[in-house]
């Protein structure tokens, strides 16, 4: 009997140690009390125009209340939604930061596949908000796929309503407000294309900011003040780089040191890198993104990975294990 009790005690202790070990891989920032939240952010794609088998094109999903808001639709976005256990048809709201191809090339897949019975059969129009030129782009995209749309309409294998488009050219300010959700667009500086926007999503007193593509930008800092989570782009090259073309690309983006200055003025609970641009053959292992950020910021920063998700409530919880983090002071 005593041996049996000892075995049970050992099993209980072993189980407790396993649970404790697993908890170490789920970082939590802010208060540690258990929370019920309906504000979740998923990095569907953290890549850039550079081809990659590990980073899909830039796209961020914000699930807030019962709404699913998609920000940008880069390469592979429909597949990334599927990996996140969602069908493209479950998304009918897309917000574009700017009209560079790496942020828009996944639109046809999300839009059209989502109108099919096998893709979730969207039950209303595909709504898109974006900078000047968005309406024209979607008008021509609709023309480009006319043969497909007509064929599916005639055969009954498509969804006319789910394939219809409602595009909106936007300006800085509130662009969406419904069910307690507020989406604010603000101008950033991507130099090569204008306008370019970042977005702030507010809900129940909590906020996340998505930078879009930008150089160091004071307007972003102004609009991001008070946000718990800031998802920011980053670009880096080897320190001894002397390439003029690489220097020009870096001039469109934000270095880790510059991003640190941004975070130090916003003071979020969590900063996350996405749209990660590594130039001149620089590998992620040698990029030292976190070490370079530490030069100007002592808070918590994550190097984002595809399908990393973050729950925002009284505390901020990272839901995917194995992500490199640097703790704040």
Image (tube, grey):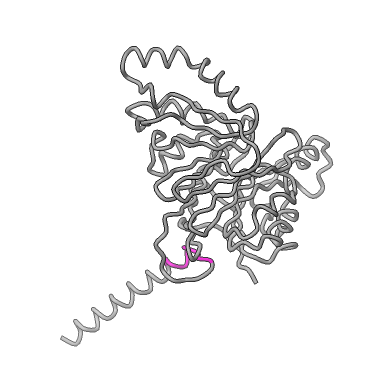
In the rendered image, is residue 131 in sight?
A: yes
Instruction: Give the quadrant of residue 72.
Output: top right
Q: Hey, which residue is sitting farthest left in the picture?
A: 1
Where 194 sits versus 271, above or below? above
Left or right position of 185 against 152: right
Q: Residue at x 56, y 30 (%)?
A: 168
Left or right position of 9 against 140: left
| Residue 304 image position (x, y, % from top left) | 57, 51
| Residue 166 image position (x, y, % from top left) | 50, 28
Q: Hey, which residue is sitting farthest bottom in the picture?
A: 2
| Residue 23 image position (x, y, % from top left) | 43, 67
- Is residue 26 on the magenta stretch? yes
- Comparing 218 with 120, the one in front is 218
Q: How many marks?
A: 0
| Residue 73 image position (x, y, % from top left) | 54, 35
In the rendered image, is residue 275 in sight?
A: no
Quarter of the image that includes the C terminus: bottom right
Left or right position of 279 against 113: right
- Comparing 279 with 93, the one in front is 93
Stretch in magenta: 22-29
Q: Residue at x 52, y 32 (%)?
A: 128
- Comparing 5 with 148, the one in front is 148
Quarter of the image that includes the N terminus: bottom left
- Is residue 235 on the magenta stretch? no
Instruction: Give the quadrant of residue 282.
Output: top right
Where 151 sits versus 73, above or below? above
């Amino acid at each position: 009997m005593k041996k049996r009790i000892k075995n049970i005690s050992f099993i209980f202790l072993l189980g407790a140690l396993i649970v404790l070990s697993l908890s170490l891989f789920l970082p939590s920032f802010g208060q540690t009390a258990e929370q019920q939240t309906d504000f979740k952010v998923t990095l569907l794609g953290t890549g850039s125009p550079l081809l990659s088998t590990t980073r899909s094109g830039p796209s961020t999903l914000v699930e807030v209340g019962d709404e699913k808001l998609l920000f940008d639709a880069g390469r592979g976005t429909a597949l990334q939604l599927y990996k996140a256990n969602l069908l493209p048809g479950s998304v009918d709201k897309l917000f574009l930061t700017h009209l560079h191809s790496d942020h828009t090339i996944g639109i046809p897949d999300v839009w059209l596949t989502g109108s099919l019975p096998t893709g979730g059969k969207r039950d209303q129009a595909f709504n898109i908000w974006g900078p000047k030129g968005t309406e024209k782009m979607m008008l021509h995209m609709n023309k480009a796929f006319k043969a497909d749309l007509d064929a599916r309409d005639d055969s009954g294998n498509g969804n006319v309503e789910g394939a219809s488009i409602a595009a909106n050219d936007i300006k800085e300010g509130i662009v969406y407000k419904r069910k307690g959700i507020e989406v604010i667009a603000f101008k950033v500086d991507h130099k090569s294309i204008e306008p370019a926007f970042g977005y702030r999503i507010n809900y129940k007193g909590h906020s996340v900011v998505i930078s879009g593509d930008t150089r160091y930008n004071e307007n972003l800092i102004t609009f991001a003040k008070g946000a718990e989570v800031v998802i920011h782009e980053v670009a880096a090259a080897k320190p001894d780089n002397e390439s003029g073309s690489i220097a020009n690309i870096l001039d469109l983006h934000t270095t880790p040191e510059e991003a640190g200055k941004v975070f130090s003025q916003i003071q979020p609970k969590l900063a996350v890198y996405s749209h990660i641009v590594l130039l001149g053959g620089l590998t992620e292992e040698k990029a030292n993104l976190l070490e370079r950020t530490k030069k100007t910021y002592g808070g918590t920063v994550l190097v984002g990975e595809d399908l990393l998700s973050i729950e925002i409530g009284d505390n901020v919880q990272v839901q995917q294990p194995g992500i490199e983090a640097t703790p704040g002071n």
